[in-house]
Amino acid sequence: MVGVDGLIPDLVTGSKDLSDSLEILAHLGAATLSRLAGVPIECALVLSRAKRSRSTAGTGTRTATLARLEKEVGEGPLTEALTGTGTAAMNHVASDFRWGRYRRHLQDAGFDSVLGLRLSLDEGTEAALAFFAASPQAFPLHVIAEARSFTDLASRGLRLALELESASTRASDLQSALESRTSIDIACGVIMAQNRCSYNDAIAIIAKASSHRNIKLRKVAEGILANLPGGAPDTHFEH
């Protein structure tokens, strides 16, 4: 079993962004379950967040395609894991009658066993892992139990990766807001000097131009600064 010291750093420090973290998690899951089951295992995952597009990842083209397909057909191991008890196992695809629309795609991809497990994340965020094997009976009860232990670690790692992504987004938004406000303030100073008016009057002039041209205040301000004799001053903040 992968320990906390191995899984969480890989997901956080070993990735460039959240998409990379999802790919790493899929490959770690496949490697871990392959050792536990004693047969080659592939893995896919889905991440669903409020007001965000659904994200999928997989260890290969087949698994990534199967993960995306579930949204179209509305059934499968990821869907059942998320909407049901948290665990969905099918150990002989050819003789199991669940997931009628999805099952044939599993067979076409060459898989005869599949296991879906839900991850435990914060409210408003859902994720699940699906493990695929070409062999039948690849997921007996003891393997499922060990797989659940892996998902506990995976949940902790993914929660941290999501928190870091959120912090990075907030920092980027703050930097953008600071740069926008700085551009507007400098443009106001230019207008105040040219028109001998107050700051509020200068803001009103920029706001009127913004409304008339249907563009953001920052764009109006940047246009004013770009027309200065020396060009626009640098308003970028260092990270």
Image: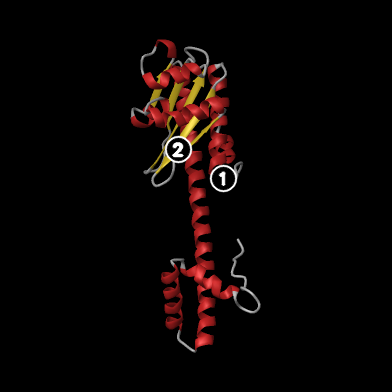
User: Which quadrant of the rendered structure holds the C terminus?
Assistant: bottom right
- Residue 17 tag number: 1
The residues tagged by marks 2 and 1 sit, at their Cα atoms, a distance apart of 14 Å
Mark 2 or 1, nearer chain start: 1
Residue 127 point in image, percent of width and height? 43, 36
Residue 163 versus residue 153 in the image, above or below: below
33 and 214: which one is in front? 214
Residue 209 seen in the current view = yes
Name which residue lies at 57% across and 35% down.
Answer: 24
| Colouring chosen for the image of the structure | secondary structure
Name which residue lies at 53% across and 58% down.
Answer: 172
- Residue 130 tag number: none
User: Which quadrant of the rendered structure holds the N terminus?
Assistant: top right
224 and 90: which one is in front? 224
Q: Secondary structure at mark 1?
A: loop
Residue at the front extreme of this rendering: 213
Q: Secondary structure at mark 2?
A: strand
Residue 229 versus residue 41 in the image, above or below: below
96 and 31: which one is in front? 96
Q: Amino acid at mark 2?
A: Leu
Name which residue lies at 47% across and 69% down.
Answer: 217
Residue 122 point in image, percent of width and height? 40, 43
147 and 182: which one is in front? 182
Residue at the bottom extreme of this rendering: 196
Residue 186 point in image, percent of width and height? 54, 77
Q: Which residue is mark 2?
A: 47
Q: Is residue 130 left or right of residue 35?
A: left
Residue 129 versus residue 239 in the image, above or below: above
